[in-house]
Amino acid sequence: MRLLVLVLALLAGPAMAVTCEDTVFEGHRFTVCTVDAAVEELHFFHRDDTGQVLGGWSALSTQVAPRVVTFAMNAGMYHEDRRAVGLYIENGIEAAPLVTSDGPGNFGLLPNGVLCLTDDSARVIESLAYEQRRPACRDATQSGPMLVIGGRLHPRFLPASDSINIRNGVGTSADGRTAIFAISGDPVNFDTFGRFFRDVLKTPDALFLDGSISRLYAPQINRADFGFAPLGPMIAVVE
């Protein structure tokens, strides 16, 4: 019996530490992808070897070949020329600085935050806390607003807000081992999106990544969102 179990395990190949599934919260559809950051190769991607913005899944797949993309999502706001808005670090190189001032738009709805990746962890950190601590992030992106901060919703979210959109974001576990990405299947406001991370996904800290242009690549559920405009920074798991 033990031999049979071993043979079946070998035939199945290595277990993937990325899982994606669809769920419903308060009548709204969400797709959730969970990544074991201590095991998986989770990285940010923005430009190819010539400096051109990758912009989408096809160029990303070419960039990482012969490795394979098993999960990807847009990962932070960007200017019209696709430069990152706020801090952006890729493979230890800072391409854009941290921004801590308030301002217009969702990014300036303070507090905002940083998704910081190391070789074995992923953590969402509020931007002022990041500025004080300056953790050694191999990769990082700044976005905003924060959705959940230390287990509490962003203080400026309004339950009855009519500002609704397709949105995507990320939450991280307290130990930094797990990153949970979510994208809404229909328009939601920030209060609903934040409560989904706090009450359903149970992430003590979560960060809004973007809205309206939000896209997900998840081949395990046969999903590859398409858009006419190229993306800016992306986050992906490569095998």
Image (cartoon, grey):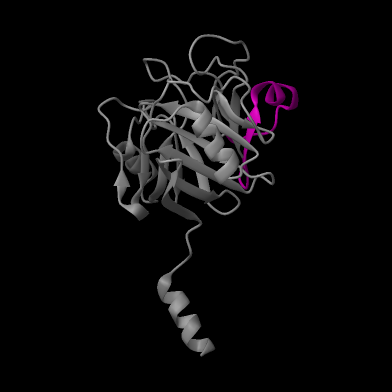
Q: In the drawing, does residue 135 fall left or right of residue 198?
A: right
Nearest the viewer among 212 and 226 is 212
Q: Quadrant of residue 99?
A: top right
The range drawn in magenta is 118-139
Depicted 77 relative to depicted 120: above or below: above
Q: Residue 201: where, in percent of width, then height?
A: 56, 45
Q: Residue 7: where, in percent of width, then height?
A: 45, 82
Q: In the drawing, does residue 117 fall left or right of residue 70?
A: right
Q: Residue 165: where, in percent of width, then height?
A: 39, 26
Instruction: List the single residue furthest toward the right.
Output: 132
Taking the spot 60% from the left edge, 39% from the top edge, the residue there is 198
Taking the spot 45% from the left edge, 42% from the top edge, the residue there is 236
Q: Quadrant of residue 94?
A: top right
Nearest the viewer among 198 and 47 is 198
Q: Is residue 109 something one can see in this rendering? A: yes
Residue 121 lies in the magenta-colored region? yes
Nearest the viewer among 67 and 217 is 217
Depicted 35 relative to depicted 51: above or below: below
Instruction: List the single residue furthest toward the bottom.
Output: 1
Q: In the drawing, does residue 77 fall left or right of residue 221?
A: right
Q: Is residue 239 something one can see in this rendering? A: no
Taking the spot 61% from the left edge, 51% from the top edge, the residue there is 38
Q: Residue 33: where, in percent of width, then height?
A: 46, 47
Taking the spot 45% from the left edge, 23% from the top edge, the residue there is 77
Residue 233 lies in the magenta-colored region? no
